Amino acid sequence: MDSLLQKLTITIPVYNEARYVVRTVESCIGQAGKIVLYDNCSTDGSSELCADLAKRYPEVTHIRHSENIGAFENFKIPVFECQTEYMALVGAHDILGPDYSIQILREMEKDPEIALAAGTIIPIDENEKHLKPVTRADWANETKDCSPLVRAGTAAVKLRKICLMYYGVYRTAKFREAWFDTPCLGYDRIMLLRTAVVGKLIYVPGATFYGRILDASRDSKTDRERRAKIIGHSRAKPLQKDNFLRNKVMIETILSQTHTLDDLSLALQYIHTIDKRYQRRRHYQKRRLIKIVASILLALLLAILAIH
């Protein structure tokens, strides 16, 4: 194993992933010095599979919690327990492409200010069929040497609806510095913006991450309710089923990086986009649809007039 890989710990939060976890872990073998499975008291046989993987592969450690601590804590613990310079977050149903880690680490070693690196992200379904859209974060490389304001603002504008860039390779110290310690819906976007403030984000095209999209047919309301239920542990106060806190923190993160009137003007442009994309999406979609329909009707009318 390349000595550089010894600097990386791959962390995999697990809860009831019996169908996929073996495939996920096997894609990570040989890609890090340590692979730690954080088993959130699974009940579907995942625990037994994780224990077997730990026996088969010396670099794999299986940690099973005695009770379900909620998704948020199961993602937080790896960040603050990691003892290596780099750490990767991998979903227990996702897959790393060959040489994913080494390609990313070689780029991160070039600049200590890099906080997060992500590869090309290909969504897949339950049967590993490729889906769309593929995420190629060229914008990260284009803005990596810009100010924290531009990095965070660009991230807010460019991040896709399915935000799999959160599952990347982090410089551990910077990930901890960026940590936002309040669970909420849309937490991944908050963390990506805060990470862009504390360090650079980069895109490594040759590294491929396959992010599994489960229950793609699930409507947004049902999905919000599901996520609000699993993020916190059973004794936690229920989360709000809207994105108020996410949007508020995104805006506060951008405004925190303004130091001049020019900065403020630029920040307001980013905030306007957040308003359009995240807060009033349906309102703007309706306006856009009206414009499209009006354009079509106008074109038809002109065509009719031209005929006559």
Image (tube, rainbow, N blue to C red):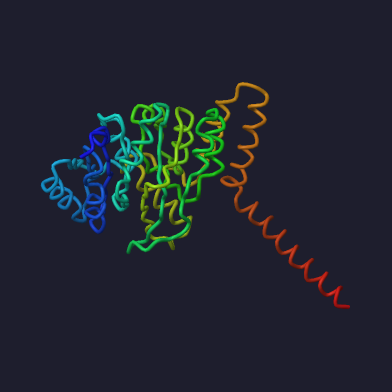
Percent coordinates x, y for residue 1 in the rendering: 20, 40
Question: Quarter holding the C terminus?
Answer: bottom right
| Residue sitting at the far top | 259
**For the point 40% across and 45% down, which residue is it?**
119
Task: Work out which residue is located at the far right of the displayed protein and give it.
Answer: 308
Residue drawn at x 18%, y 55% is: 45
**Quarter assignment of residue 262:** top right
What is the count of numbered marks?
A: 0
Q: Residue furthest left?
A: 55
* Relative height, residue 46 to residue 180 (above, below): below
Q: Quadrant of residue 72?
A: top left
Choose between 241 and 76: the one closer to the eye: 76
What residue is rendered at 22% in x and 43% in y?
Answer: 37
Classify residue 226 as left or right of residue 291.
left
Q: For this rendering, which residue is in front, 157 or 73?
A: 157
Residue 77 horizontal side relative to residue 131, left or right:
left
Residue situated in front as seen by the camera: 257 or 111? 111
Whole-percent x and y of residue 300? 78, 71
Q: Position of residue 249 (x, y in %)?
A: 51, 34
Residue 128 spot, x, y in % from top left: 34, 61
At 21% from the left edge and 37% from the top edge, which residue is drawn?
33
User: Which of the pair 113/54 is nearer the observer?
Assistant: 113
